[in-house]
Amino acid sequence: MNKLGLVVTCLILCLSCSLNTTSFAASGVTSQNPGAAASWQPTKTIALLTGVLTWQDTSLATYTAENRYDQQFYNILRQRGVPKDNIVFLKDKKATLAAINKSLQQLLARSNADSTFLFYYTGHGDNSEDGSETYFLNYDCDTQNFDATSLKLSTLAETIKQGFKGKRAILTADCCYSGNLNRVAEILGKAGIETIVLSSSTAANESTGEWTFTRSLNEILTGTPLMQCDELELTAASAADYIAYNMACAEMQLANYRLTPGFPAKFVLTKLGASIGKNKPHLGKYMIYREDGVDYKVRIVDQKDKKCRIHFPELEDEPDIWCDYSKLKNIAWKTWNVGSKIKVKWEKKWYPAQVLKREGFFHYIRYDDHEDVWNEWVAFDRIKDISDPQAED
């Protein structure tokens, strides 16, 4: 196993769409000023985006460059009005540690009291052996010495703290252990920089190699999320809700959400011209579709009366189809009580473990005979009862 990170506090979030989603959690801490009115100002934003899908060190797994949602994220920011000179997007070979540090310092030097700083990273994330440091892996990192050759989140925090002249930061990441951006937020918050973190995983968990997080973020910023929303504003809280639901259902993964004191949960990211999903209460819902005795996870992407158009997220080449809503069934989420002795699957092997706490449908577990640094959040797809004969080592 890779060493897992530190525990973060979990917050149950209620999605603003009309789904039964109160059991889907995103890790995080609520703002101390949830009612303050504020809106994102793209023209006053400086942004550093880093997307690494291939590495100089060939021992690191690569990702496909097809349908790069990080490139789409960059395009959306430009379309929303972030000035060209205020945004740097470093991709693959250009995303060296030196280039990241230089770009960060140059961008921060352009900031003023009205600036918002936006940070985004996608690629590989890893932790130190003791879990005290997290690394976002730049193109030229050395797997034998991450501490000296990779982007350390502690360094990222201090660089922003020292160089940023504004009062608000937005930190996002789509990678393993990305929830450790909460540590960066804590440092910035204490320095008077109101900060939000949206990331694909908790500080204790790996992340999938899919684009679900970034795609969800893009949909929020373009005002095209698959959700029913009666409000004409998509806020920080609704973005966190939307990402949490998608990550839970599509990836069986607990997303991360953090607001430092002063950053309003009602911070407006996107203003809509019309409400989303009117008369479509099931829009965006993940369900199970059975055909020829096989169950498929599907997502409702359109709805008309009792008919739904469903997408097969695990079968991207499969065309969307229309079916009667009655042919769909809910995902059979299962939970275990705190203290339960279970077995947890990790890399095709089952390990005895115990449930330490539960938030909604996610369980924070400790592996027997392993140190706490291995603890993580898991859903039912990786859990078996201790007596289940199918959960053999």
Image: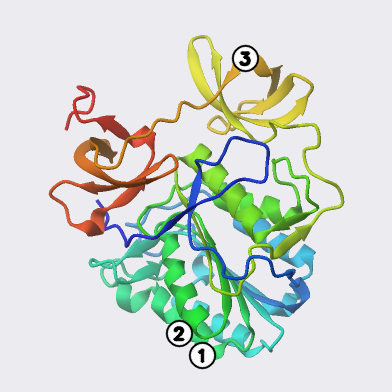
Q: Amino acid at mark 3?
A: Lys
Q: Quadrant of residue 319?
A: top right
| Callout 1 touching callout 2 (CB < 8 Å) | yes
Decide which of 154, 313 is in the foreground and name it: 154
**Does dot 3 land on a helix, a strand or a loop?**
helix
Q: Amino acid at mark 1?
A: Gln
Separation of marks 1 and 2 at Cα, in angstroms: 6 Å
Residue at the spot 69% in from the left edge and 17% down from the top edge: 323
Where does the image place residue 33, in percent across and percent down from the top left? 62, 70
Separation of marks 1 and 3 at Cα, in angstroms: 57 Å
The label on residue 158 is 2
**Does dot 2 land on a helix, a strand or a loop?**
helix
Decide which of 42, 94 is in the foreground and name it: 42
| Quadrant location of the C terminus in the rendered image | top left
N-terminal-most mark, 3 or 2: 2
- Can you identify the residue that label 1 sits on? 162
Find the residue positioned furthest to the right.
273
- Can you identify the residue that label 3 sits on? 327
Specify whether 175 is left or right of 354. Answer: right
Q: Note whether residue 188 is visible.
A: yes
Which colouring convention does the figure follow? rainbow
Residue at the spot 44% in from the left edge and 61% down from the top edge: 178
